[in-house]
Image (cartoon, helix red, strand yellow):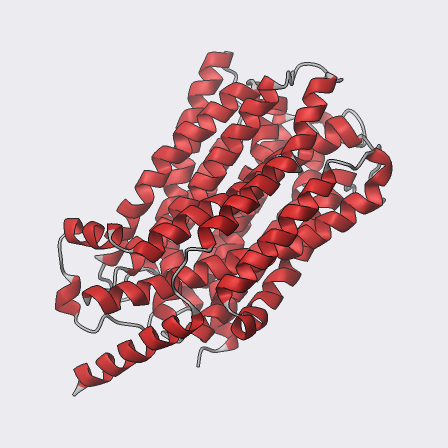
Amino acid sequence: MISFKEKVGYGLGDMSSSMFWKIFGMYLLFFYTKVFGISPAAAGTMFLVTRIWDSVNDPVMGIIADRTQTRWGKYRPYLMWFAIPFAAVGILTFTTPNFSESGRIIYAYMTYTLMMMVYTAVNVPYASLLGVMSGDPKERNVLASYRMFFAFAGSFITFMLLQPLVDFFAADGQEAMNDNSISSDPTGWTMAVAVIGAICALLFFLCFKWTKERVKPIDEKKNDVSVKDDLKDLCKNAPWWILMVSGVAALLFNAIRDGVALFYFADYIQINYKMPYMGWTMATIYLLVGQAANMVGVALAAPISNRFGKKRTYMIALAIAGVLSILFFTLTPEHITWILILQIIISICAGYVLPLLWSMYADIVDYQELKTGRRATGLIFSSSSMSQKMGWAFGAAITGWLLAAFGYNQEVSMQPDSAILGVRLMLSWLPAASCLLAIIGMMFYPLSEKKVKEVTAELERRREAAKK
């Protein structure tokens, strides 16, 4: 049995990753357009190019991690090695140089590409830990739930701290132009990210210290094969392909909703309000409510999926999220209570989905080991990270391009009706379409609860036989 301390330690790793990941997903497009000073279209293209390039790096990192041999294990050392670079490059990403617009675009490409490469170097090995901490599918469900609970807790902390920190560090006390927006002072953004980056580095060190690697391949010699063979086996793995397609669609749902949320409140809702003492705008409250609801969904994911099955729980949660997302299109600024209520329910459903994805990738690792005799944990989990980044890449790019297509102009305070319509569509119908794609993909997923139990039992039998 894995101790409570180790479960918490594992969760702290994704708390760290998520603190930065949510800044990228929720704030980076806003930062690049409102603070850094480049157009939404340029930012959207940059997101697509850099994240697709970075997605290609994920399998490479997985292959490297699978072949790493240290006294700390295969995957844990990367948490220690890249903790400080992770924080440092994040600070550079949110630094605004005194360059021309073309110079700033080049700087954005360079720093964001480097940020995603460092993120890959620490997050792919971290994700792979789930496959080697335990061989029990139900225990992995619990670990995945701890992971996602702490991930959403990290996002909650980010949303709670970032806006007040930006306003606090803003040069000469410069605050937002009004009470429905965050400060656009570059210094405030850099310093705020520096504080959060320091927290992230500490959390990665604790994750390294408190976790252990236990699951070993049945035959270590069989694991010592060429990269070509590993990739060939992966390409023949039908459940992996299906889960990857469904995962990209599910993450596209989150990416589009997250990327446009600040624009939705700044340009459509426009409620001038800041919470006393805390200084949170209505947009920040919306994000905080969503993260708290995500944590509720994550806490319920393991017991519900253990009873009803991962596949069924995953599909039902996405169906509810998609239908409720459509209702967002009917809401106006006067419906702020309903906006928050729908955000809570949709976020609970999203909280169900993500831990199930990670747990199903662990099942696919077992399935491939049974078929091939080799345990390519890092390679398969890197594909999950790749699908996550591809979902966010296309989501962020689509958001930026659609803002530009609908006539969004970052240089004016009042947006045209066409831009407002685009923002509303991106918080309703487009996420709903992504849910539908994810559900269709999951319909073809073949690893039922019964099949997973059979795979686990056979692997345990072979491990016991190998010891004799």
Q: Residue at image x 26%, y 71%?
A: 216
Quarter placement of the C terminus? bottom left
Q: Is residue 238 above or below residue 263?
A: below
Q: Position of residue 172 (x, y in %)?
A: 72, 26
Q: Residue at image x 63%, y 19%?
A: 406
Q: Position of residue 425 (x, y in %)?
A: 66, 31
- 418 left or right of 401 in image: right
Q: Residue at image x 42%, y 25%?
A: 109
Quarter placement of the N terminus? bottom left
Number of marks in the image? Answer: 0
Give 115 or 334, whichever is nearer the viewer. 334
Q: Position of residue 423 (x, y in %)?
A: 67, 29
- Whether residue 182 appears in this view of the structure is no
Q: Is residue 301 above or below residue 160?
A: below
Q: Residue at image x 24%, y 63%?
A: 70
- Whether residue 187 appears in this view of the structure is yes
Q: Is residue 146 above or below residue 250?
A: below
Give 245 or 355, whichever is nearer the viewer. 245
Q: Is residue 353 above or below residue 336?
A: below
- 27 left or right of 360 in image: right
Give 376 or 419, whichever is nearer the viewer. 419
Q: Position of residue 52 (x, y in %)?
A: 38, 34
Residue extending farthest to the bottom is 468
